[in-house]
Amino acid sequence: MVVAIEGVITKKEPTFVILKCLSGLSYGIFISLFASSKLQSGQKVELLITQIIKEDSNKFYGFLDKDEQRIFEMLLKVNGVGATTAMAICSSLDTNSFYKALSLGDENALKKVPGIGAKSAKRIIVELSDAKMQLENISDNKSEALAALLSLGFKQDKILNILSTCKSSNTSELVKEALQKLA
């Protein structure tokens, strides 16, 4: 699993960059418009990566900050929202605007995103409003443990319930404790 890539931007388009690493290997990475506005060709940068592997593709989605990546990954769990739509939301709404739309149930803010209609906006608000509140109340270690357990295929709501009962303080101990309780 690729977690981050550091390199020099050799090509930049509005929502796509090519990053050349020190080893000489270049990666094509999809980015949001917010990230794109902060990047320049020739700049050395480290992008947090969400890798999506499908039968016919292996794509990298890059983020400058963990919050934007977390929103992207939360959106992927919503029924009917794919990577393209999730990235469109990340390009249209900054982190604060997205969380504000969720907490207020503001469908209109989400409907302004290309590809999001009334039904999709409602679905996103309903499916993510509980997850957003739960995620705000967990520590960084629990957030990292959540990500690790999600990558193992466990369901987010079940993981969050288990993590709330865990006593460990560091990430690896939290994952071990949660796995014992999930078994």
Image (cartoon, helix red, strand yellow):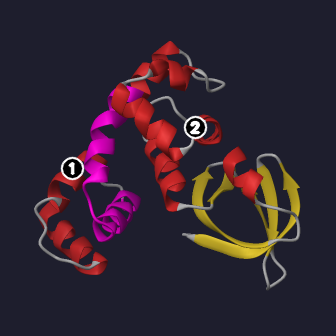
* Residue topped by disc 2: 93
Crowding at mark 2 (Cα within 10 Å: few <14, some 14-19, many 20+): many
Asked if the magenta segment contains residue 130, the reply would be yes
Which corner quadrant of the image does residue 39 belong to? bottom right
Residue 175 drawn above or below residue 109: below
Task: Please identify the quadrant where the C terminus is shown.
Answer: bottom left
Q: Which residues are magenta?
A: 125-152
Which corner quadrant of the image does residue 79 belong to? top left
Q: Nearer the viewer, residue 145 or 94?
A: 94
Side of 56 where 10 appears, left or right: right
Residue 95 drawn above or below residue 117: below
Task: Please identify the quadrant where the N terminus is shown.
Answer: bottom right
Is residue 26 at least partly visible in the picture? yes
In this view, the residue farthest toward the bottom is 23
Q: Nearer the viewer, residue 96 or 168?
A: 96
* Residue topped by disc 1: 158
Q: Residue at x 43, y 45 (%)?
A: 74
Q: Earlier in the sequence, mark 1 or mark 2?
A: 2
- Label 1 element class: helix
Amino acid type assigned to the residue bearing label 2 in the image: Leu
Side of 49 where 147 appears, left or right: left
Crowding at mark 1 (Cα within 10 Å: few <14, some 14-19, many 20+): few
Residue 26 placement (x, y as % from top left): 82, 71
Residue 73 drawn above or below residue 20: above
Q: Residue at x 21, y 68 (%)?
A: 179
In this view, the residue farthest toward the top is 118
Amino acid type assigned to the residue bearing label 1 in the image: Lys
Residue 159 placement (x, y as % from top left): 24, 55
Is residue 155 at least partly visible in the picture? no
